[in-house]
Image (spheres, rainbow, N blue to C red):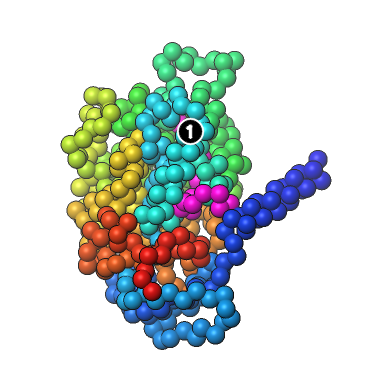
Amino acid sequence: MTIFRTTFFTTFGILFWLVSTSLFGQKKTILINNVEIFNGKDQATIRGNVLIEGNVISKVSNAPIPTNRGTNVQIIDGKGKFLMPGLIDAHYHAMFANLSQIALLTGNLGFVNLVAGKSAEALLMRGFTSIRDLGGPVFGLKQAIDAGIIAGPRIWPSGAFISQTGGHGDFRLPNDVPSDPSNGLSYAERINAAAIADTPDGVRLKAREQLMLGASQIKLMAGGGVSSIYDPLDVTQYTEAEIRAAVEAAENWGTYVTVHAYTPRAIQQAIRAGVRCIDHGQLIDEETVKIMVENGVFWSLQPFVDEGDKGVLSPESRAKQLEMYQGTDTAFELAKKYKMKIAYGTDVLFDAKKAAQPGVQLLKMKRWFSNAEILQMATSNNGELLALSGKRSPYTGKLGVIEEGALADLLIIDGNLIQNLELITEPEKNLLLIIKDGLVYKNILKQ
């Protein structure tokens, strides 16, 4: 059995390398000259040049970089345009963003994957070179992107989000209750969209299954949600012992747990259990923010505001949504008061129109932050959050910054985003160059 496993995985790795190499071709040296560099961290930009060797930034300099490196060098004249790290969405659902909930839960999974693949390519072409996927059967899509079969962003997958019975990730119908193990798993569980687990042992098992499949972090539903059927917004989900079971499983694999939670009680319980990141938190209070600061917890906070469009939500879900929206301003104000490092993410669900406008979603952050602060969140801050996965990160190297040794995910914009963030809402025209992992996916710079 040991010989079989070794041979199988070695063969699989070789085939994966051959496919990716044949589709991508060999990476070459790229020299980008004469650009205004936003490094992802500092508001002040510098005029300079960037050398990429393979998939890594090897030199950043305001002095000329020698080009006597053979014939396999692509020289790009940036013409003084704005160079920045690739954008990162820290709360994305690649499989759930573009189709309705009913289509996802009743449609053919092959169709869902094809839609997700096309949408992933579109997301990359709008400047998002990395996403942290917080729930959904995304492992196949990630594999196809990494192998070069389709274009798309890097994916940090969670796999199925883990939910208690009646929790935010329970998609079963009322007539599926009481549960009967002899009937098998629900469709959402069978396709690895969600995992229902009750008791610490059950949660531990489901967390280990996702880690086995390649999860870079574990996602738990720790409180009520807007789009879910059964749970009011104020409910706290799971016990501290159940959450701690997932945390222990993740920590044994060198990674962490993030939770969906809105309320102080749900957030505080998750922190006591050892959770490293809170996603959402719109109904938080000041005491809970202090606890987050004291424990070094990352806050992934989305710009949820009422746009007057309830979409396809039921009246019950719309009421929960409006209640959640009322806390957004307070949450951001408290985050600013305590100088918390915020991760930026969209959490677009079942809405193809919003999914097709990631720049518009980013622009919503202007309600609370300067352009420079927003860009820092969507690059270096999010890069730090991705790094919490440690060795479970699917990609080795630093992201969200332009510095020597960082991975080569770069954009050139026709205009300074620090001065005019609105430019990002028209990527077809204003996004001139896209490089991911040292490969050029778009270049409309006139040479």
* Amino acid type, callout 1: Phe
Q: Nearer the viewer, residue 292 or 319?
A: 319
Magenta-drawn stretch contains 426:
no
Q: Position of residue 401 (x, y in %)?
A: 41, 67
Q: Residue at x 52, y 33 (%)?
A: 110
Q: Position of residue 74 (x, y in %)?
A: 50, 74
Magenta stretch, overall SS: loop
Q: Number of callouts in the render?
A: 1
Instruction: Kindly state the secondary structure of the residue where label 1 is placed.
Output: helix
Q: Label 1 belongs to which residue?
A: 111
Measured along the vertical axis of the image, is residue 433 above or below residue 10?
Answer: below
Q: Is residue 372 left or right of residue 57?
A: left
Magenta-drawn stretch contains 158:
yes
Q: Residue at x 50, y 41 (%)?
A: 138
Q: Position of residue 196 (x, y in %)?
A: 50, 28
Q: Is residue 234 left or right of residue 60?
A: left
Measured along the vertical axis of the image, is residue 121 above or below residue 101?
Answer: below
Q: Would residue 210 be seen by someone viewing this image from the given angle?
A: yes
Measured along the vertical axis of the image, is residue 254 above or below residue 259?
Answer: below
Q: Nearer the viewer, residue 89 or 335?
A: 89
Q: Nearer the viewer, residue 284 or 118?
A: 118
Q: Would residue 258 be seen by someone viewing this image from the given angle?
A: no
Quarter location, residue 379:
bottom left
Q: Position of residue 137 (x, y in %)?
A: 51, 37
Q: Is residue 426 left or right of residue 135?
A: left
Q: Residue at x 37, y 38 (%)?
A: 98
Q: Residue at x 36, y 31 (%)?
A: 100
Q: Look at the image and tell me in which quarter the C terminus lies.
A: bottom left
Label 1 environment density (alpha carbons within 10 Å; few <14, some 14–19, many ≥20)? few
Q: What's the magenta region?
A: 147-164
